Amino acid sequence: MTIHRIEPSVYYYTFGPHEPAVRIHSGDTVIAETRDALGYDTKRDPMPEDMKQPAEDTSLRESNPVVGPVYVEEAKEGDLLAVHIRRIRLNRDFAISKQGAHFGSLSGEWPGHMLLYNDPIPTIWTEWKIDLDRNMGLLELPNSRLKHVEIPLHPFLGSIGVAPRFGRIETTLTPGEYGGNMDCVDTGEGTTLYLPVWVDGGYLSFGDVHAAQGDGELNGTALEVTAEVTLDIEVLKGRTAQWPRIESDTHIMVAGSTRPLMNCVRLAQIELLNWLVDEYGFQREEAWQLNAQVGTMRIGNVVDPCYTVVAKCPKRYLP
Amino acid sequence: MTIHRIEPSVYYYTFGPHEPAVRIHSGDTVIAETRDALGYDTKRDPMPEDMKQPAEDTSLRESNPVVGPVYVEEAKEGDLLAVHIRRIRLNRDFAISKQGAHFGSLSGEWPGHMLLYNDPIPTIWTEWKIDLDRNMGLLELPNSRLKHVEIPLHPFLGSIGVAPRFGRIETTLTPGEYGGNMDCVDTGEGTTLYLPVWVDGGYLSFGDVHAAQGDGELNGTALEVTAEVTLDIEVLKGRTAQWPRIESDTHIMVAGSTRPLMNCVRLAQIELLNWLVDEYGFQREEAWQLNAQVGTMRIGNVVDPCYTVVAKCPKRYLP
Amino acid sequence: MTIHRIEPSVYYYTFGPHEPAVRIHSGDTVIAETRDALGYDTKRDPMPEDMKQPAEDTSLRESNPVVGPVYVEEAKEGDLLAVHIRRIRLNRDFAISKQGAHFGSLSGEWPGHMLLYNDPIPTIWTEWKIDLDRNMGLLELPNSRLKHVEIPLHPFLGSIGVAPRFGRIETTLTPGEYGGNMDCVDTGEGTTLYLPVWVDGGYLSFGDVHAAQGDGELNGTALEVTAEVTLDIEVLKGRTAQWPRIESDTHIMVAGSTRPLMNCVRLAQIELLNWLVDEYGFQREEAWQLNAQVGTMRIGNVVDPCYTVVAKCPKRYLP
Amino acid sequence: MTIHRIEPSVYYYTFGPHEPAVRIHSGDTVIAETRDALGYDTKRDPMPEDMKQPAEDTSLRESNPVVGPVYVEEAKEGDLLAVHIRRIRLNRDFAISKQGAHFGSLSGEWPGHMLLYNDPIPTIWTEWKIDLDRNMGLLELPNSRLKHVEIPLHPFLGSIGVAPRFGRIETTLTPGEYGGNMDCVDTGEGTTLYLPVWVDGGYLSFGDVHAAQGDGELNGTALEVTAEVTLDIEVLKGRTAQWPRIESDTHIMVAGSTRPLMNCVRLAQIELLNWLVDEYGFQREEAWQLNAQVGTMRIGNVVDPCYTVVAKCPKRYLP
């Protein structure tokens, strides 16, 4: 059980079977400092051009640089990669957020494309103060009756995923069956993420830590921060999944990502149903009846090229 | 402040400006016993044919009989009707649930119509035991490893609404800008529902109490029960809304209902944004930034002809 | 076979079992002059307030006044009403069109509600000249390189429908299983529309003639005109349908209306498949294979509360 | 103006900047024989394993092998690649089609994933006879009243695209802003496809010829055939596009691909509007009004991971 500290020389803007940053064994731990979604580090220095991968220049490359990939020697196609998120330590005193043209749930636009006749919405940058000692975020509201507001932080990994199946390479802007930019608050400290391995080695990458975020990531950004992230990584043989599964102290969960939003519901619920039947001994219709009454859902994001819904079943009702 | 006890002689299967069951004044209280979504009463007796309205026979008429309408003398088009849900007292020891052909989030079908090449799913009826003293529901799971499960109840009104605007008449199977079959757990005891008045008198109707339900009402039904419901009804002059607003001790909320699901998100969030700006003194972009980080959402139903999403903002962050 | 000329004293803005304008027998013919979608008559006179039904005032009532209802004595629930569109004679020399705030496929808005953060698009009224002799429409384009354009007309009924099932009353702004505001170019002269009868008598209403329109009615309006419409109406016993069916010289067609757009495809295709199997003797999978290769689709409208897709199968491939 | 005949040693199942099969100059012509969507050649021989790229084994790799990529020396990011489809010569006497489990518009499933509670639909293989002399396809219908049917062929390229922007690599199962598996009948002989160049060299690949297909490719397959394809390829400097544009003798067209289907409409129509404004001298609102009345749409596919809608404007109304 080795601890690997990654000092990234490059950051990727895609999930795929890239040149690994580190090769580890099942059971090892990885520690790395992540940059924020916009590429800034703890000192507000932007990402140097020569650290951006892939090398070709495009505007979309500017979002969600991820650390990795981590190549796990024992991970074979069809296995399950258990990633225990042991720690997410915030390490700077500000967060960046914004509402942006051509992005966000209410702008009616597709990333980089206009979907509507209207003009794009104005881009507005916002900075939150982060109080690391008190684990609070402070927002100034100069033009509102309430002049400022303070909220508790709940840091989580906005983007974490493996190489997609079938040799695809996906931008870190979108989530999928390989994880990716799920932007769901459930991938926080203390939870375990189970990712299906599609390509031998797995190629786990991660970044885009959010200090806090509402459901849906409505305006397209959260409290974008840097952090030191500690992950315990284990390969599970003989277990399988079609979509990312998440386990916390209280819930088992599945993150389904696609468009339209209703199909995220369907993908996540069918996978959750399969989980209940395959690993918890439920008869199919009985699981369906139970979960229809006790299950909840979170809308992770409604802004990425694929949306994400997390279907959740309380563990208190499981054997 | 009069208390009106309604003893229904007919039940409606549509929301509209029907012959009122009672005429009240703003500030009055209404008490009524509701039948369950399938028409059964506390003694498991089915709805007599001559109590079903409208009189024409169709299969869809079998869902969600509502008590009312309540005509509120002071309610004029453009007002807001505040309905404080003071009490929902369950009054029988069983609940009915089912998965049904041509219905439910994963059956891929439109109410009454096939949307797919596949055969419809089998209809399976389920009965839950209700422990009224302990406020718990018990489900037998004879074919699963876990043989039974017990869950806490959280009763709420599945269907409550006024007459829709523009003289439309809507089946109690669907929600809309007038409320209706929202199937959202947030309309429980102690909350206040604000409904826009579209037709003078308002014509409030209600029923379809659920003892418990998961997000989305995935299989198309909840724990369908009867109850005695107590509502305090008040007309608010000079306030307005485009969609049903809900207020609890902890949150202000908006229920947006339409298809596709993503547009429910949009309708609810835009209305919530308008609420924050108009009544809480936020500048628009600042409200948008704040709510994007602290707002949550619940998926009320994904089975009715229109789906429902509830957008929620915590009151602790409001002035 | 009586010919009934309707001289409307009121126009309805809803489809429903209203007081009939005329009672006819199966086989009779109905002739009436329709007003345009905005209520104007041939002389550009607006609709008098006392001719608008229902009497309650709302802004949405301003769209698609329809003539009728026509009560057909022999029409019983479960029958099919065959409406042969014998003639649509345009009778004025101008058409009105517009792009409107809160409406249209690219405005990102729900009728009457904002769906987006953006401002609504500007409302722009446009007038086309109609050359009745040459059956052409002329549009001035003062600000474009091309200064004007002339297009051939293909008049059709934008709105035609019966009373919806289950005592619902629907605004003439939306289509459904009862027909309604389908805005599909296929309901033109010489075609036959088969509408399922949901309520005894049928209650057929019609209006909203378009002199021409592109697929989707993209900006929310077509070339809105008045016309004299001649319909031959017949009750078909022993035949049934779930959605409006249309037959022309060359195609059998089904109009499926709902949201999202993909479900219009599904509703229309499943109904078309049922038609091929039930009335043309195809085995189900063989019909499905054939129609997948020769069937076409038109997107009727993508602006109404429900969208419409018309699935079409060429009659040349039918027995 | 050189003619390059490609004799493929490998076929790709992804669009991306792969090792080029040939390097050409703007103005050159490329000729190649394509295999069918399932990998079969003219003699019904399956694709040898060592010709499949990428080398990793997965089930999805089995669809739509493409020839190429063609590296065009003058093609730089931001240019437009004009691909004139000079000839599609069918070269075998049968076509393969099927309805498949987990695929197709009415199966309610996501490629490779269940979206529904139901069982998947049965997989049924169908073979069409191709009469090359008469350009007709013949289908036996043994279980239907009509025992066989003959349809005229209209061959087109189901899949043709360049490398996607931002270093992504996309499966040939899906379309996008780079073209890809659009499955739209408009990419037939005599038309010109304009593809935006996202990566220097363009990396054009093509295959998946369909001898005929209905709108939507409803069951997930068309008349899958082999063909010899002749393309004239030219780089257009100083012209740009966001989505594939197509030009025939009669129409200018845009293919928009995404989910949900309504957003395909929006993407295609906005791009078509931009085209009318930028290259044909229309003022924006005037183009919008005109196209709303004369424009048509085709639904290319509703089965791939992204759907495709083709927005069409008749050239007769353009200056």
Image (cartoon, coloured by chain):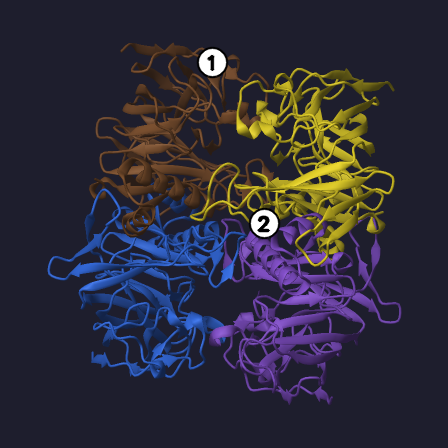
Chain colours: A purple, B yellow, C brown, D blue
Point out residue D55 in the picture as x, y percentages from the top left corner.
42, 82
Q: Is residue C29 visible?
A: yes
Residue D33 occupies quadrant:
bottom left
Q: Residue A169: give its label.
A: none
Point out residue C69 in the picture as x, y percentages from the top left corner.
43, 17
> Which residue position is annotated with label 1?
C10
Residue D285 occupies quadrant:
top left
Q: From the viewer's perspective, is A81 left or right of B234?
A: left
Q: Nearer the viewer, residue B183 or D201?
A: B183
Task: Identify the amino acid type marked 2.
Answer: Met
Q: From the viewer's perspective, is A264 left or right of B2?
A: left
Q: Is residue C209 visible?
A: no
Neighbours of disc 2 within 10 Å: few (<14), some (14-19), many (20+): many
Q: From the viewer's perspective, is A129 left or right of D189?
A: right
Q: Nearer the viewer, residue C125 or B6?
A: B6
Identify the secondary structure beneath mark 1: loop
Point out residue C140 in the picture as x, y percentages from the top left corner.
34, 38
The N terminus of chain B - image quarter: top right
Query: Residue drawn 72% across and 57% down?
Result: B146
> Which residue position is annotated with label 2?
B262
